[in-house]
């Protein structure tokens, strides 16, 4: 049990992926005036599903990287298990996600997004597909698998496909592209050592950094549009917007001291997670009578 968080790679996704999924759910509840107990209760199975989906993606990748990670000395809890335990762990987390999704199987588009989420994770890690080692295809695939398709599930549950849906998906996709490049850049030396061909190993570090900078610039625009849209659609959220701006100003001295390149090339630079993770979980409670 003590190794469970590392097995499911909890620290890699709990605060960087789940918040935006829940933000979208809260946002749709509010604009559709559906802040009702039965809809809030559905957050439990939906949260379990998202946690299981994220765990499955990381665990499957660790399963196919277990021998490579052993050579490079990278920690891989999945690789420390017996063959039977590895299969059992994958089947368990996959089954947990599919069972938790039971309340949502009657949404056709949600089921389609669910299918593509798992398929993308498989194509990214599993041989002979192994899109992880196919350059730009790899970073696109993993961003779709871990961020875009899961977020699309939320919008499919509400059957809400409008301009705001596109903005949410675009921002999530851009965040995913930048974060996977950070991951590949941090692992670059070990991947070169074990001859794993990722986008970051096939390109000079400067080019990878420039790609992250490009994604980040568009991400800032998308984030500004998203926050502005949410504030306009749910106007009583305005105090949270002010709080978020003050929070970022508070962090500015830290950013300046570390340097922009250092911030951009690590997981330190986060636009939305502090806002969505700490602020929006309490938002629906203030709209109980809407």
Image (cartoon, rainbow, N blue to C red):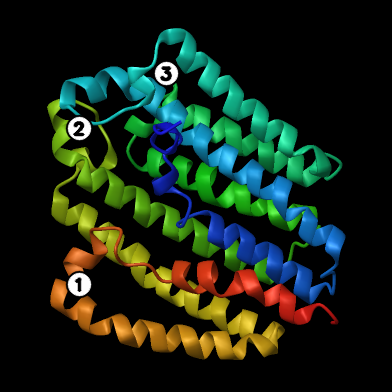
Mark 3 and 2 residues: CB-CB less than 8 Å, in contact? no
According to the picture, the residue beneath numbered tag 2 turns out to be 191
Q: Give the image location of residue 228, x and y in percent.
A: 57, 84
According to the picture, the residue beneath numbered tag 3 turns out to be 127
* Mark pair 3, 2: CA separation: 17 Å
Residue at image coords 44%, 35%: 58
Q: Earlier in the sequence, mark 3 or mark 1?
A: 3
| Displayed quadrant of residue 95 | top right
Seen in the image, is 16 located left or right of residue 27? left
Quadrant the C terminus occupies? bottom right
Mark 1 and 2 residues: CB-CB less than 8 Å, in contact? no
Residue at image coords 53%, 23%: 90
Assign a secondary structure to mark 3: loop
Say which of 54 and 174 sits in front. 54
Instruction: Between label 3 and label 1, give the one nearer the viewer.
Output: 1
According to the picture, the residue beneath numbered tag 1 turns out to be 260
From this view, report whether residue 232 is shown above or below residue 264: below
Q: Earlier in the sequence, mark 3 or mark 2?
A: 3
Assign a secondary structure to mark 2: helix
Residues packed near mark 1 inside 10 Å, few (<14), some (14 to 19) or many (20 plus): few
């Amino acid at each position: 049990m003590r190794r469970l968080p590392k097995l499911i790679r909890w620290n890699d996704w709990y605060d960087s992926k789940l918040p935006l999924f829940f933000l979208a759910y809260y946002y749709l509840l509010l604009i559709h005036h559906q802040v009702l107990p039965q809809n809030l209760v559905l957050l439990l199975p939906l949260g379990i599903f998202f946690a299981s989906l994220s765990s499955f993606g990381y665990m499957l990748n660790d399963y196919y990287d277990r021998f490579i990670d052993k050579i490079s000395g990278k920690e891989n809890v999945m690789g420390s298990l017996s063959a039977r335990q590895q299969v059992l762990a994958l089947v368990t987390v996959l089954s947990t996600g599919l069972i938790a999704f039971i309340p949502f199987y009657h949404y056709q588009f949600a089921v389609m997004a669910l299918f593509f989420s798992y398929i993308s994770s498989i194509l990214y890690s599993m041989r002979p597909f192994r899109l992880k080692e196919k350059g730009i295809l790899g970073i696109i695939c993993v961003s779709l698998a871990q961020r875009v398709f899961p977020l699309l599930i939320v919008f499919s549950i509400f059957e809400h496909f409008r301009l705001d849906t596109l903005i949410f998906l675009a921002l999530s996709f851009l965040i995913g592209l930048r974060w996977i490049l950070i991951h590949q850049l941090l692992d670059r030396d070990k991947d070169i050592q074990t001859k794993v061909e990722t986008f970051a190993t096939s390109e000079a570090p400067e080019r990878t950094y420039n790609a992250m900078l490009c994604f980040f610039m568009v991400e800032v625009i998308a984030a500004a549009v998203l926050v502005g849209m949410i504030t306009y659609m749910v106007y009583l959220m305005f105090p949270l917007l002010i709080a978020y701006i003050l929070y970022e100003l508070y962090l500015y001295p830290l950013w300046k001291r570390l340097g922009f390149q250092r911030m951009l090339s690590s997981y330190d630079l986060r636009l939305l997670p502090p806002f969505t993770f700490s602020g929006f979980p309490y938002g629906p409670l203030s709209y109980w009578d809407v």
